[in-house]
Amino acid sequence: MKKELFTIDYTRIPRAEFDDELRILEQSAEQAALKAYAPYSRFNVGAALLMDNGEIVVGSNQENAAYPSGICAERTAIYYAGAHFPDVGIKKLVLVAITEGRRVEEISPCGACRQVIMESSMRHHAYPVYMVGVDSAIVLDDCRFLLPFGFDGKDLPQTS
Ligand code: THU
């Protein structure tokens, strides 16, 4: 028996050190969050994807009276990107959240979104995730770190 270690490092960027690109993506995510349909949780999430072709794709959470039918901001954005730019990789994912009129501290993707983020990176390449809060952002250089030991489907039977 042998203990093994899984370590994840991340960077915290103070707001004063945000570069122009991060500021623009944060604004895009915030605008998206303001358009969320979240009458049940009143928790608005915005996601902005910078694509390899320079496009910015945004998404917000879209809720439903049948609660499980709702979808998170991250999946809204990633599925939009998959539908509109199937051959383009994602360069960055930037997340913000607003509740009770205020931005929240670093918003962290739910488990289902982590799964979808992982597969979106496998379609093209890995990309960083920026969880942007009020005073700082947490950056994971490789989005796959969000889901250690995740299910990546590689053992599924091959279809020819
Ligand atoms: N939500 C997101 O859109 N993204 C996250 O990363 C966490 C949670 C949404 C789902 C639901 O509409 C609301 O936030 C409260 O959970």
Image: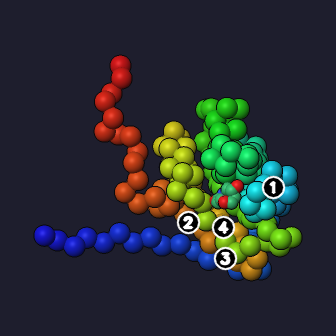
Q: Residue furthest front?
A: 66
**Residue sitting at x 50%, y 44%:** 119
Residue 39, disc: 1
Residue 74 image offset from top left, x and y in percent: 66, 51
Which residue is under mark 2? Answer: 140
- For label 2, the SS is strand
**Residue sitting at x 35%, y 69%:** 6
Q: Is residue 84 above or below residue 108?
A: above
Q: Amino acid at mark 2?
A: Leu
Residue 149 image offset from top left, x and y in percent: 37, 57
**Residue sitting at x 54%, y 46%:** 116
Q: Is mark 4 within 8 Å of ligand 1?
A: yes
Residue 113, disc: none
Query: CB atoms at circles 3 and 4 under 8 Å apart?
Result: no
Q: Amino acid at mark 3?
A: Ile
Query: CB atoms at circles 2 and 4 under 8 Å apart?
Result: no
